[in-house]
Image (cartoon, rainbow, N blue to C red):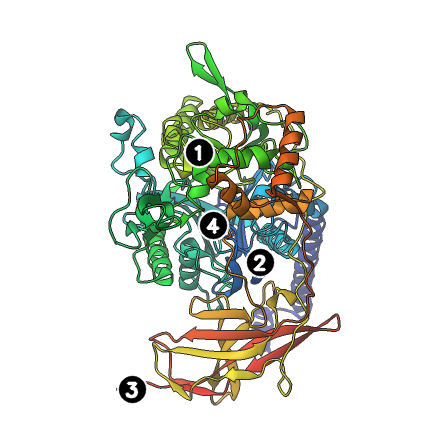
């Protein structure tokens, strides 16, 4: 036993050894804990010194850029406010079909020394007022991280968004001046999108691809396009660009984050008869793409973490109305050069016989669908489906290289343009020609104006001679100005008009962003197809000559930073179609921009400091004539939110549910980020209601109607009559256009061709006052009273919708005794059934 015990003791650790092992184990654990704690504290104090608001994910080696993406609602007022785009008085918002969004994309290099922000916004275009106010708000939190120089705001160009956000008179004549609710909604939503994108920045990668999308656009001014040299036109297969460029953004640790596409097409699928806020075909494409990329738990349109921006490009002469223009009364083709149709009239029969005139209002283009909603869906789906195939294509090319930017303010009213061989030309003070007032086949214009007008007419020259001096406080247009703009016959010399405030901007932004081998030219308006092609080629050639790679790509981001209408080629300008008449700074406008952007890319790539240029100034005396919404009224015995016409008891998939409530003016609460309606489904056995659709969804419509107002429909209203009204508000002198026409036809109204003699203008005004053409303007201030509102909600039940029990909620806010009170109305419960 002793031997055995001895052997056991020799082959087993002693008690002392066991204690040493335990001590070493405990010491190791403590060491690990202390080391981890010290590392954590070091990381904490190190991160405190870093820009922790920028980096929310630890860097990993597989990424090449810091990327931040976010979208935010910018919808604004959905009632009473004139829509920006068609310049059509009376096309005021009366509800909402789809919400509007700002989609922000921030890209920084790996050292975080340089970053750019590209923001695509669902509105008509960016105004200088909005851009500068957005930068002002960003400076409060970020200092000089985001400035005019590295932030681009690009408008999608929907014609179904609220107007009144410019600070320049011409853009605000139909919206009755500025609209504070629209301005504040745009600014707040854009700023939020940039701030959240900033906070979400993470390491990631970018890929780019360009391919051709067909049957999604046509040229609406083909006769002007044909003015370009034949040798140049032969380089291209189509008279519009079909190329779509897509940027795909992926987080290195989390997969797809978003996309930006650039493709030229007007957002005029929704025509000028529409009164519902709508993001049009590009907004439709964005909604479809974002819906398709939902992550688990994401079931609300507009609330997805993935953002798809379908941004605008060189769309100046590019229409989505692919069925083309036709005469609405005969179905025949319109005149090719003037886009007019014959119309027979008779003046004072039988003294004057019938005769035929050409009317621009009869020549209207239509989309591929049976109505504007279907046309919007078709063109939107084409862009979405094509972008989706590009998103998944193996032909995507990685984006490599630095991030940089260039920006300059330019006074476009007197740019010197180098024509070569020692010759130069200059741009002009802004002006709009006769053909501007004609509109185009996507949205026709006023009176007897038509496209292709290169000479003024006697009556309108008389009107201008009387009216323009009233709208100018300083110098007046002269013969040199008219010669500078030729062959454009000037209708509105907006470079001189400053009542009630400046009519057009003259200081504009020119801006370039670089992301690797991609250059983004942010332009302050709408380049025509050939104008855009020339700009792209010029920038690309210069970039490659300066050392950028052969696979350099250039895209145009239209309607960015400030709006100056159109930029057509010199040759297209001679045709004076709508786009040429709306090229503000004269025939050399396009060449001036080409020169500026080409020089800018050279300076950017050399790393040279670019002179900032003259700073723009915005008016501080802008007017707002719309007024606040009236208090709300309902008949005795009912409550706000009570149903007038209820839903049926049953529906089938594919039906439309429609019901009407006693409501209130939506302007009492724009519900930024919220909703005016909910379609809810009853969940059994959870015994709860789940929201499945809101007013951001394509399938719903929120329609508001003021049933207490009676509109005077006897007066013809258009951009000219509303301009006259705006001048009257500012000066107290009203120009009676009907009286002027009457006297002119009687041969009792004529004004000699004018010069810049101010004293002679005063004598003309006195004579016109005596004739009754000019009258003292004393607007009648009507008793605002109250407004009775009826709200109709429609839900197009998808054919795939599940059977079950549903209801629809209406969320409103009524004004009574200066207090706004929220309320909710509900439909009856109804069933979706399938009948076989």
Q: Are marks 4 and 3 in contact (CB under 8 Å)?
A: no
Q: Earlier in the sequence, mark 1 or mark 2?
A: 2
Nearer to us of marks 4 and 3 is 4
Q: Position of residue 177 (x, y in %)?
A: 63, 49
Residue sitting nearer the eye, 516 or 57: 516
> What is the C-alpha distance between the residues marked 1 and 2?
34 Å
Query: Which residue is labeled 3 in the image?
Result: 835
Image quadrant for the C terminus?
bottom left
Q: Is residue 574 left or right of residue 59?
A: left
Mark 4 or mark 1, earlier in chain: 4
Nearer mark to the viewer, of 2 and 3: 2
Q: Residues within 10 Å of mark 2 (few under 14, many from 20)?
A: many
Question: Between tags 3 and 1, which lies in front?
Answer: 1
Which quarter of the picture shows residue 113? Answer: top right
Q: Is residue 269 left or right of residue 808?
A: left
Q: Identify the element where label 4 is drawn.
A: loop
Q: Which residue is mark 4?
A: 86
Q: Which residue is mark 2?
A: 81
Residue 10 image offset from top left, x and y in percent: 59, 69
């Amino acid at each position: 036993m002793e031997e055995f015990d001895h052997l056991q003791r020799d082959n087993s650790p002693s008690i002392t050894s066991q204690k040493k092992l335990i001590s070493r184990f405990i010491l190791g654990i403590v060491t690990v804990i202390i080391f981890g704690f010290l590392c954590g504290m070091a990381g904490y104090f190190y991160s405190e010194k870093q820009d922790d608001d920028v980096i929310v994910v630890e860097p990993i080696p597989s990424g090449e850029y810091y990327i931040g993406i976010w979208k935010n609602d910018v919808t604004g007022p959905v009632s009473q406010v004139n829509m920006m785009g068609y310049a059509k008085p009376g096309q005021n918002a009366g509800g909402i079909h789809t919400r509007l969004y700002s989609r922000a994309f921030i890209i920084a290099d790996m050292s975080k020394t340089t970053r750019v922000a590209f923001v695509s916004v669902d509105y008509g275009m960016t105004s200088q007022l909005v851009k500068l106010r957005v930068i002002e708000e960003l400076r409060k939190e970020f200092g000089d991280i985001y400035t005019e120089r590295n932030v681009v705001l690009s408008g999608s160009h929907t014609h179904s968004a609220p107007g009144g956000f410019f600070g320049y008179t011409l853009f605000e004549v139909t919206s009755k001046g500025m609209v504070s609710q629209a301005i504040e909604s745009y600014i707040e939503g854009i700023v939020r999108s940039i701030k959240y994108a900033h906070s979400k920045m993470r390491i990631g990668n970018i890929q780019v691809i360009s391919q051709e999308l067909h049957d999604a656009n046509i040229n609406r001014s083909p006769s002007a396009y044909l003015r370009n040299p034949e040798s140049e036109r032969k380089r291209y297969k189509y008279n519009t660009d079909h190329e779509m460029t897509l940027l795909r953004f992926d987080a290195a640790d989390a997969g797809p984050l978003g996309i930006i596409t650039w493709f030229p097409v007007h957002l005029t699928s929704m025509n000028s008869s529409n009164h519902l806020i709508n993001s049009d075909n590009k907004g439709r494409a964005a909604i479809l793409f974002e819906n398709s990329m939902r992550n688990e738990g994401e079931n609300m349109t507009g609330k997805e973490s993935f953002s798809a921006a379908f941004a605008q490009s060189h769309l100046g002469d590019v229409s989505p109305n692919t069925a083309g223009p036709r005469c609405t009364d005969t179905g025949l083709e319109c005149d090719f050069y003037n886009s007019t149709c014959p119309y027979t009239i008779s003046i004072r029969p039988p003294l004057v016989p019938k005769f035929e005139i050409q009317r621009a209002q009869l020549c209207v283009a239509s989309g591929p669908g049976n109505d504007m909603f279907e046309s919007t869906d078709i063109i939107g789906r084409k862009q979405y489906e094509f972008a989706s195939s590009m998103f998944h294509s193996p032909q995507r090319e990685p984006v490599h290289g630095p991030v940089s930017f260039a920006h300059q303010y330019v006074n476009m009213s007197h740019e010197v343009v180098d024509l070569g061989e020692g010759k130069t030309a200059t741009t002009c003070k802004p002006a709009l020609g006769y053909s501007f007032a004609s509109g185009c086949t996507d949205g026709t214009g006023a009176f007897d104006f038509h496209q292709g007008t290169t000479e003024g007419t006697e009556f309108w020259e008389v009107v201008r001679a009387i009216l323009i001096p009233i709208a100018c406080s300083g110098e007046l247009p002269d013969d040199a100005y008219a010669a500078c703009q030729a062959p454009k016959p000037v209708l509105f010399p907006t470079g001189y008009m400053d009542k009630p405030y400046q009519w057009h901007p003259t200081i504009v932004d020119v801006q370039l962003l670089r992301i690797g081998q991609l250059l983004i030219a942010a332009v302050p308006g709408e380049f025509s197809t050939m104008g855009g092609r020339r700009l792209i080629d010029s920038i690309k050639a210069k970039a490659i000559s300066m050392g950028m790679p052969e696979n350099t790509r250039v895209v145009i981001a239209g309607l960015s930073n400030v709006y100056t209408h159109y930029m057509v080629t010199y040759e297209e300008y001679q045709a004076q179609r709508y786009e040429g008449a709306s090229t503000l700074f004269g025939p050399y406008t396009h060449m001036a921009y080409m020169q500026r952007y080409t020089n800018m890319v050279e300076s950017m790539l050399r790393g040279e400091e670019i002179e900032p240029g003259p700073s723009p100034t915005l008016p501080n005396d802008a007017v707002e004539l719309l007024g606040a919404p009236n208090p709300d009224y309902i008949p005795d015995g009912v409550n706000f939110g009570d149903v007038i016409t209820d839903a049926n008891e049953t529906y089938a998939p594919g039906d439309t549910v429609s019901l009407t409530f006693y409501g209130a003016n939506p302007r009492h609460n724009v519900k930024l980020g919220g909703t005016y309606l909910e379609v809810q489904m009853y969940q059994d056995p959870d015994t709860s209601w789940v929201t499945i659709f809101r007013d951001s969804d394509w399938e719903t419509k929120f329609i508001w109607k003021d049933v207490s107002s009676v509109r005077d429909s006897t007066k013809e209203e258009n951009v000219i009559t509303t301009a006259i009204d705006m001048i009257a508000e500012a000066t107290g002198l009203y120009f009676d256009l009907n009286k002027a026409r009457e006297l002119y036809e009687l041969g009792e109204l004529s004004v000699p061709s004018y010069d810049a003699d101010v004293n002679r203008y005063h004598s003309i005004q006195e004579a016109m006052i005596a004739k009754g053409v000019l009258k003292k303007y004393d607007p009648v201030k009507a008793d605002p009273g109250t407004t009775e509102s009826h709200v109709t909600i429609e839900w197009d039940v998808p054919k795939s919708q599940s059977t079950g029990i549903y209801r629809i909620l209406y969320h409103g806010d009524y004004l009574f005794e200066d207090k706004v009170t929220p309320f909710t109305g509900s439909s009856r419960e109804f069933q979706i059934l399938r009948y076989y």
